[in-house]
Amino acid sequence: MDNHYILEITLISAQGLKKTSKFRRMKTYALAWIDSADKISTCIDRVGGENPTWNEKFLFRVSREFLYSETSGISIEIFADGIFRDTLVGTVRLLVDNLLCNGSPYIPVRVPSLNAVQVRRPSGRFQGVLNVGASVRLGSDVPAMYVFSAINYRDLIKEDPKSKIMKRSYSTLGIPHKNPYLHYNGQPYSRDPIKERHRMIREVEKTKHARSSSDGAIAGWGSGPGFSSKNATRSGPHDKFSYQKPVSVRSSLAP
């Protein structure tokens, strides 16, 4: 395992892809793999249509024999995100021998080699171009790749030790790191601004009600001229105390 290398493949963009729908903008993503059991995906491009841009870097752990083999390559599939199912737009087969500086025997090749490769449609015809970059690094350059055989660089950053320090600092405050939308009382924030506004209004009303109840209780036991506790009544547990004027009753025994 000490003699492995890191093959970096950067899916930059594509141009002139075949549209899959006439009624909605095409939203595309790409899958890449050496071993079909370890496929890696880009994010979905939602604005480029037939000319998407991803700029995503994939890392693959490979052997020296793989890099020098003329048949070694990376498979790429481009899909259009759909409402019910995703549609295959095209496929690309990247031969490593053609990617790395036109078959340069020097390893590692840290300077990326940029290439434009034709995209093959499911019908077998070529339409569109995929822009891709490739480079090779020593395995020791990326120690985390001793664990992973293939990973998106975006996901690799999440495994960085610095992020684990952040997780510990969040946990000391009692706030789970995995859900940034948790409030101090454990209630999730709403991503909908209208719902969030209603939630805040309810919180304010609860605070006002609690304060008014406590103020009424204190005032009910009153301080002021002519006010005594025996004259204070309330109709419910949350109502303010109210003052009732004492009624004088003439005793029948009075002379």
Image: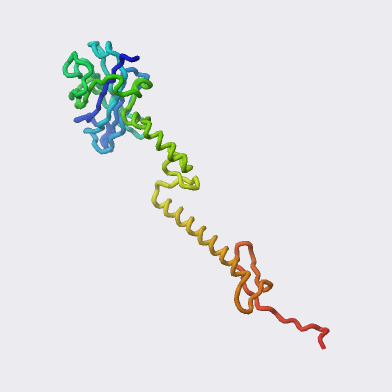
* Residue 25 position by quadrant: top left
**Is 94 left, or right, of 167 in this rendering?**
left
* Residue 210 position by quadrant: bottom right
Viewport quadrant of the N terminus: top left
Instruction: Let me know if residue 123 appears in the view.
Output: no
Q: Nearer the viewer, residue 66 or 17?
A: 66
Residue displayed at 33% across by 15% down: 2
The percent coordinates of residue 39 (x first, y second) are 34, 23
**Is 251 left, or right, of 72 in this rendering?**
right
* Residue 37 position by quadrant: top left
Counting labels gives 0
Q: Specify the color scheme.
A: rainbow
State whether residue 118 is above or below residue 163: above
Residue displayed at 57% across by 63% down: 214
Q: Nearer the viewer, residue 131 or 8?
A: 8
**Is 187 left, or right, of 105 in this rendering?**
right
Q: Nearer the viewer, residue 158 or 31?
A: 158
The percent coordinates of residue 6 (x first, y second) are 29, 20
Viewport quadrant of the C terminus: bottom right
Residue displayed at 44% across by 47% down: 189
Residue farthest along the bottom direction in this orientation: 255
The percent coordinates of residue 191 (x first, y second) are 40, 46
State whether residue 28 is above or below residue 196: above
The percent coordinates of residue 51 (x first, y second) are 21, 33
State whether residue 107 is above or below residue 195: above
Instruction: Let me know if residue 154 appears in the view.
Output: yes
